[in-house]
Structures are given as structure tokens and as C-alpha cells.
Image (spheres, rainbow, N blue to C red):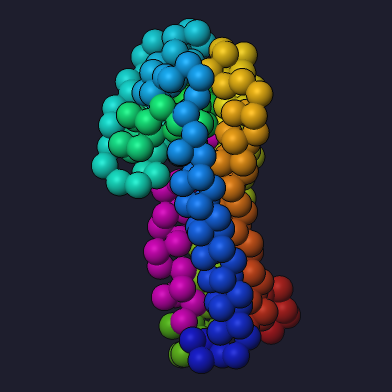
Amino acid sequence: MFFDPLYIMIMIATAALGFWASWRVKATFARWQKIGTRRGMTGAEVAREILRRSGVHDVKVEQVGGFLADHYDPRHRVLRLSPDVYNGTSVAAAGVAAHEVGHALQHAAKYWPLQVRSYLAPAASFGGNISMIVFAIGLMVGATGLAKLGVVLFALMVAFTLITLPVEFDASNRAKRLLPEMGVTQGAEGVGVAKVLNAAAMTYVAGAVSAIATLVYLIIRSGFGSDE
């Protein structure tokens, strides 16, 4: 399969899309990282203020190493922000911090797509790790059933990727709404927040497109759904 022209074409196209999305989010973040908010709150302060005003008092805000390694850990109820966001007073830092808080608010509100995503995570991780191996072995030994099992396992990862989209979009929408309501961002600053979060969202869209394209390829090559 790795020498299949169709597979190579899909990999090149999706890799290019992923590279573009990654470049865009880094470039957009860098641009708005240079512009501070009028209130001058750090990302950590923004996160804690939103949590406080939202009545969520059991989520910690911590610093984590790495560039744009920001994430919310629902198991330990910890919001981890990268140094540029945790200590930053820029429009970009405020936007990213508010976005991650959005996930904590989703968790507190039992937002159902987030719950589904959490349930799918173990199966998606397992399927993503072994699906291509199972599929390739099935093709090599002529075991159609094994190849189709690989497709099913990969489909679990695709489902996880797709349910991630509404989770991320909702967190961004919460951030765009809450920041001006709190007075953290004003006027053009809100435009900057939107641009940073929209660019970040494209990385998830690119991932979903890549996953779907690969799944379609696996279905075609495995003969999934055929009577044979």
C-alpha cells in the first residue's frame, strides 16, 4: 500500500494541508503575540478570572513547557498553559487561555460532545495505533477480513477526530464571547482573538480531512462493503 500511487497522492495532499494549517496558526499567533491587551492581564489571570466568574472553582491553572502546548486535562481538572500564554499579556495569549478555559466550562456543564469524545478516546487511541498494521498485514496475506478489521479500527480514530471539531469550535466561540463580556478585549483586539482561534481551528479541520481521506482509501482498497 505504501507504494500505491493513490495512497502517495493522498499522503502528499493531506501533509501539505497539515503543513499549511500549522504554519498559519504559528504565524497568526506570532503576529498577535506582539499586540498587548488594554487591561494587560496575563493568560493565567484571564483563565482564573473566567473560571471564577463562571463559578468553576475546582480547576487549577498551571504552566507547562512547550510552544502552544496548552490544553485542559479533564481527569485531573487542570488547565495547563504554555509559557507564552501563561505569562503573556498579548491578544494571542488571552485568546488561547480563554479557549482552553472553554473546555473546562464544557466539562463543568457536561457538554455532550466532550463527553462522547472522552468515551471514544481509549478506543480511538488503540485503533489509531494498530489499524494500519492490521490493514497492511491483511492485504499482504490476502486476508480480506483482517484488512476490513483494520478499516473498522481506523474508523474509530476518524470518529474521534470528527467529534473533536464541535468541541473545539464551541470552546473558541465561548472564548470570543467571554473576553469582551469581561472587558479583557476591546474593539480590534476581539478581531485578533478571532483570527488566532480560527487559525487554530484549521489544524483540527486539516486533521479531520486527512483522516477521512485515509479512511476512504482504506475502504476502497479493502473492498469493504463488497459481497466478496
Asked if 175 appears above or below 196 in the picture, the reply is above
Asked if 52 appears above or below 218 in the picture, the reply is above
Q: Position of residue 124 (x, y in %)?
A: 47, 53
Closer to us: 201 or 217: 201
Question: What residue is at 51 percent from the left and 52 percent from the top?
Answer: 27
Question: What residue is at 53 percent from the left and 71 percent from the top?
Answer: 15
Residue 116 is left or right of residue 104, and the answer is right
**Can residue 152 be seen by looking at this rendering?**
no
Q: Position of residue 126 (x, y in %)?
A: 40, 57
Asked if 199 appears above or below 23 in the picture, the reply is above
Q: Position of residue 228 (x, y in %)?
A: 69, 84
Which residue range is magenta in the image? 113-136
Asked if 207 appears above or below 222 in the picture, the reply is above
Examine the residues drawn in magenta and state their main secondary structure: helix
Residue 126 sits inside the magenta stretch: yes
Closer to us: 220 or 201: 201
